[in-house]
Image (cartoon, grey):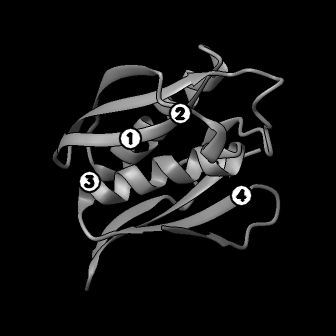
Amino acid sequence: MYEFIPHTADIGIRVKGKTLAELFQNAAFALFDIMSDIKKVKSVIEEPIEIEADDLVELMNYWLSALLKQYTINNRLLNFFEIKSISDRMLTALIKGEDYNQSKHNIKKEIKAVTFHNLYVKEIDNGWESEIIFDV
């Protein structure tokens, strides 16, 4: 679903998906899998989300940043990401998770932000690929 790529100070990942929707879902999964033990998160709270941007690169950044805000502002960990519709400028999705509970959830790595540094989203032979750098 994703792999780490070398980066000197932050965390870099390469994500792939057979479809554009799967790419965005896998990137979201990677974000929360890096941050926490995603298997311990339950899907008890669900929320629709809509993101608009000027292009796919901006859409990826805004998508992941909106999800990260669920943790930093709402104190919520996520484990389910279903892209309902996606284009090069907009996505709608359903996200699920639960509020962070210190006695239940382990935060492995604090991610401060999703950067635009070297961020790309491109179609490849067997689907889609993106590289993303997280500021830690």
Q: Is residue 112 left or right of residue 124?
A: right
Q: Position of residue 124 (x, y in %)?
A: 29, 80
Q: Mark 3 points at which residue?
A: 21
Give the amino acid at mark 1: Phe
Q: Residue at x 77, y 29 (%)?
A: 104
Query: What number is the disc on residue 78?
Result: 2
Mark closer to the observer (3, 4): 3
Labels 1 and 2 touching (C-beta < 8 A): yes
Q: Residue at x 26, y 82 (%)?
A: 126
Mark 1–mark 2 distance (CA, rounded to whole Å): 8 Å
Q: Mark 1 points at which residue?
A: 81
Determine the secondary structure under disc 3.
Answer: helix
Mark 4–mark 2 distance (CA, rounded to whole Å): 19 Å
Q: Determine the image quadrant of residue 76.
A: top right
Q: Position of residue 117 (x, y in %)?
A: 58, 55
- Of mark 1 and mark 4, the one earlier in the sequence is 4
Determine the secondary structure under disc 1.
Answer: strand
Q: How would you rate the neighbour count of disc 4 (Cα within 10 Å): few for under 14, some for 14-19, many for 20 or more?
A: some
Q: Mark 4 points at which residue?
A: 11
- Of mark 3 and mark 4, the one earlier in the sequence is 4
Determine the secondary structure under disc 4.
Answer: strand
Q: Which residue is drawn at 60% across and 35% down?
A: 41
